[in-house]
Amino acid sequence: MKIGCSTWSFHHAFETRELDQLGFAQVAAELGLDGIELLTSTFPSVSPRYTGELQAGLRALSVDISAVSVSNDFGFDDADERKQQCEDVRRWTHVSRDLGVAVIRTFTGNVHEGVDPLEAKRWVYECYERVVPEAERVGVTLAVENHSGLMNSPEELAELVMHFGSDALQLNPDPTNFLPGHWRKPESEREVIYTSLERIARFAVHSHIKLRNFDATGRPTNVDVPRLLKIYRRASYDGYLSIECAGTEDPKEVVRKTLACLRPLVAAE
């Protein structure tokens, strides 16, 4: 497994323009990360000139792009809006291919007020029907994250992947997302994090990891990391663990602590 970090972890620095993508790559290299996950919102351009400069800069730093992350929403009740969401995902399949990135993180969608969730789930299938063939054609994989309000359970996600039966539609698990506010809950209630991951780990092509509340020994208290890694190993997962920072701590410090925790465990494979 490799260790990376999402630009979301530094979203405040991107919003204030303290960081851009190459600056973030420099930070990643200094911290000793293997790769970076780039949210589409952090791209100043997708012109051949810019993407060429980005690739050259990353090669110089020996930093890979683990995934391009699209924050799509297939739960809109407006058909034209859903069509636009699909077009956006399709566009990023081409950008990702040109960047040499094999994985695109996607969402299913949100639950919108006044919309029947069952109807919205049908729209999710319809939208993936539109975008999966293009992902297959250009040779990239759409990795669905358990993030949004629609189809967030392991059963729904597994059913979605198996329905299409395509290597171009797999998953991006974020284990702690299976229990919102998990860090405030007792350990006895966190079992759903591990049982949910066990059900979908075989479909993982990219993964998020959120560690927080480190104790004096450097161990995160919000999740059992060795247990998570054991589940991934049993599923023969060999992709990225992309760090996402939560809370108000300095993201650079959280990444350092996360790396210090993860590196020895990953190296022990």
Image (tube, grey):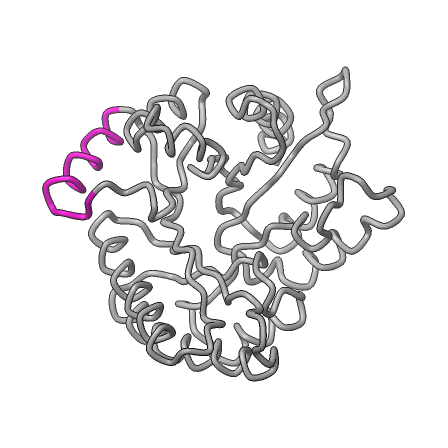
Q: In this view, does 63 lie above or below 52?
A: above
Does the magenta segment cover residue 48? yes
Task: Please tell me how many numbered marks the rendered image carries.
Answer: 0
Picture residue at 71% right of the left edge, 51% below the top: 180
Picture residue at 28% right of the left edge, 69% below the top: 87
In what quadrant of the picture does the C terminus appear? top right
Q: Residue 205 in the image: x percent, y percent?
A: 48, 55
Answer with left or right where residue 169 lies relative to residue 114.
Answer: left
Q: Is residue 213 above or below residue 46?
A: above
Main secondary structure of the magenta stretch: helix
Q: Residue 191 in the image: x percent, y percent?
A: 82, 52
Residue 217 occupies quadrant: top right
Q: Residue 245 in the image: x percent, y percent?
A: 56, 34
Q: Is residue 42 above or below residue 214?
A: below
Residue sitting nearer the eye, 84 or 239: 84
Residue 148 occupies quadrant: bottom right
Outermost residue to the front: 114
Q: In this view, does 230 lie above or below 218?
A: below
Picture residue at 33% right of the left edge, 78% below the top: 80
Q: Give the range drawn in magenta.
A: 45-60
Does the magenta segment cover residue 151? no
Residue sitting nearer the eye, 1 or 113: 113
Answer with left or right where residue 94 lies relative to residue 159.
Answer: left
Answer with left or right where residue 130 lies relative to residue 113.
Answer: left
Residue sitting nearer the eye, 131 or 29: 131
Picture residue at 42% right of the left edge, 61% below the top: 72
